[in-house]
Amino acid sequence: MAQVDLTNVTDVGVEPGTLPDTMAAWVIRQEREGEPIDAFQMEEIEVPQPGAFEVIVRVMAAGVNFNNVWAALGVPVSVFRSHPEEDHHIGGSDASGIVWKTGEGVTKWKPGDEVVIHCNQASYEDIEVHGLDPLAAPSQKIWGYETSWGSFAQFTKVQAQQLIPKPANLTWEEAASYGLTYFTAYRMLIDQCRIQSGDRVLIWGAAGGLGVFATQLCKLTGAQAVGVVSSPEKGALLEQIGITGWIDRGEYAGMMRRGGESADEEKARFKESRRFSKAVAEILGGPPDIVFEHVGQATFPTSVLTVKPFGKVVICGATSGYSLDFDVRYLWMRQKQIIGSHFANAYEANRANELIDQGLIRPVLWRTMGFEGVAEAHQLMRENKHLGKISILVGAEAEGQGKTAEGPGAIRAEVGA
């Protein structure tokens, strides 16, 4: 296979409307699944052509998410089970770029348009797309994880409905940094929980990739929010973006559920959870109406205990484990609700993006790396050595490019739960 010139990735050699034959891409293949630093390798790949209602986008910058650490490792399941029709996986579920070629039926977009890409795909033919929610469609997949042709390449192939106008107040790397986490948080709070002014909200991992957006959405909607963080430095970041108050989780380490506790251990854990619940209520002026969950096993029993009667626990993931064990009496006797949520649909993604465009919500970006850093970035994430959101420059020659209007831009910060 021909060697790709890493020094020339910012030059695609063709004008919008025309595609080159091949492109540079970071590729995972099934036979080398394992540590990201080895699983990701640079290859020269044929550039895909757009099908009906599809668009080829020249990637200017890409965002790094944990889903492609899983793709590299091949766990919990191999991505090749999701797209067996392709023998390669080009990951990347966040991107900013330029529309380069449109397929048959695409009328809303034209070559040269600057866009952000959201990562939900579904078949146009599924009836759920036309009246329920694309997230309910049997064909629903996360682009760049459950599909190939993600953003770690010079060009990517997407459905036209995935395109969103790029906020003019952001650089390419800033615009590539927020979609997956922000749009997930938006659906959880705005559409699933219908958050209102005056609501009280508990946010786990409030300085993490999801939490920084949950915190800003609470501030914007007039809700009171308490965030759980791992250090005073993280608490200071939350104060900067509008948190009501924060709690250092280290002061309540005994409330975390490991699984398999003895009766005495569970009694002690439950006592710590009650102490934590009181601290939350003191900060918020009452128990939370909503708990923003994505931690899972370690925190879920405390979430169900802490949320007020008739309150809602909304969950989109389980970073500490997905087998949940909690006292269900606090659920049914106090008529609480558990709501599952997964990413966002195109309408939600566009509505959420308008708030970025208006400067009302800001991305939080830690570090930007060159295209040669894709494998390294995922290895950092695998080893938990990253300190926040990483963007990758692809078509952009340097940081700071792509901004065409005044606006606050991203917050540069070390973030983490």
Image: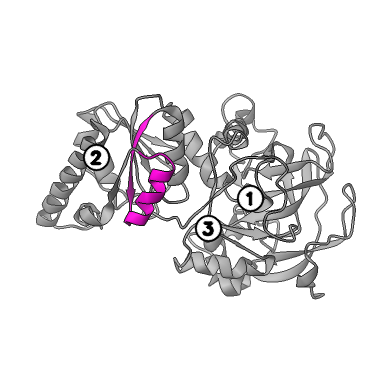
Q: Earlier in the sequence, mark 3 or mark 1?
A: 1
Give coordinates of residue 268: x percent, y percent: 12, 53
Q: Which residue is mark 1?
A: 176
Element under disc 1: loop
Q: Which residue is mark 2?
A: 280
Which numbered disc, 3 or 1, marks the residue closer to the eye? 3
Element under disc 3: loop
Element under disc 2: helix
Name the image quarter holding the C terminus: bottom left
Q: Which residue is mark 3?
A: 366
The amino acid at mark 3 is: Trp
Q: Is residue 269 above or below residue 166?
A: below
Residue beneath the point at 88% across and 60% down: 13
Which residue is nearer to you in this view: 402 or 286?
A: 402
Which numbered disc, 3 or 2, marks the residue closer to the eye? 3
Q: In which quadrant of the rendered view does residue 367 lie?
A: bottom right
Q: Which residues are magenta?
A: 223-243
Residue beneath the point at 47% across and 30% down: 190
The amino acid at mark 2 is: Val
Give coordinates of residue 204: x percent, y percent: 35, 46
Q: On the picture, is 237 further left or further right than 54? A: left
